[in-house]
Amino acid sequence: MERMQASSPYQRCKPSRKETHKKMWAQFQIRQYLDMNGLDGVVDRWGKYLDRYGWEVDHDVLGCRDCWSDHGILDYCERSIYSPLHPLHICPDYSDCSCDS
C-alpha cells in the first residue's frame, strides 16, 4: 500500500492536550512577532508567555554549566536562544549554525 504525501510539510493535526495546543499556538504567534519586531519587541509583548513556558531569551551562556566552549566555539544548551532546540531559535551572527534554516 502506498503512503499518501502530505500537501504541506507542517503539522496539520490539533494536539489532544489543551496545554500542548496553547504552547504550540504561543510559539507560532511569538515566532511571527519575532520576525516582524525583533527580540526586544517579543520580550516586551510576550514576556509572560516566555516565562510561563520557560523559554529564556536572556540566557547567561558564559555562566551556564550546560553551555560549553570547545577552543572558542560555543555549544549552546537548549535554554539558550542560539540553540537549534530552542523554540525561538535565532542563528548567531558570528558562527556557523547547525539548524536547517
Image (cartoon, rainbow, N blue to C red):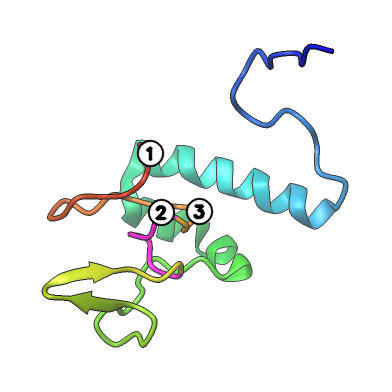
Q: Quadrant of the C terminus?
A: top left
Residue 35: image location, x then y, percent: 37, 38
Q: Are marks 2 and 1 in contact (CB under 8 Å)?
A: yes
Q: Quadrant of residue 83?
A: bottom left
Residue with the most extreme front position:
1
Relative vertical location of residue 83 with respect to residue 27 in this rendering, above or below: below
Residue type at mark 1 is Asp
Viewer-side label of 3, 1: 1
- Residue in view at x 39 percent, y 65 percent: 57
- Residue in view at x 78 percent, y 32 percent: 13
Q: Can you tell which mark lies on residue 84?
A: 2
Magenta span: predominant SS is: loop
Separation (CA) of disc 3 from disc 1: 14 Å
Separation (CA) of disc 2 from disc 1: 9 Å
Q: Can you tell which mark lies on residue 87?
A: 3
Mark with earlier residue (3, 1): 3
Q: Can you tell which mark lies on residue 100?
A: 1
Near mark 2 (Cα within 10 A), the count class, few <14, some 14-19 or many ≥20, is: some
Q: For the residue labelled by badge 3, is the local secondary structure a helix, a strand or a loop?
A: loop
- In the image, residue 82 lies in the stretch drawn in magenta: yes
In the rendered structure, the answer to whether residue 67 lies left or right of residue 31 reads left
For the record, the magenta segment spans: 79-84
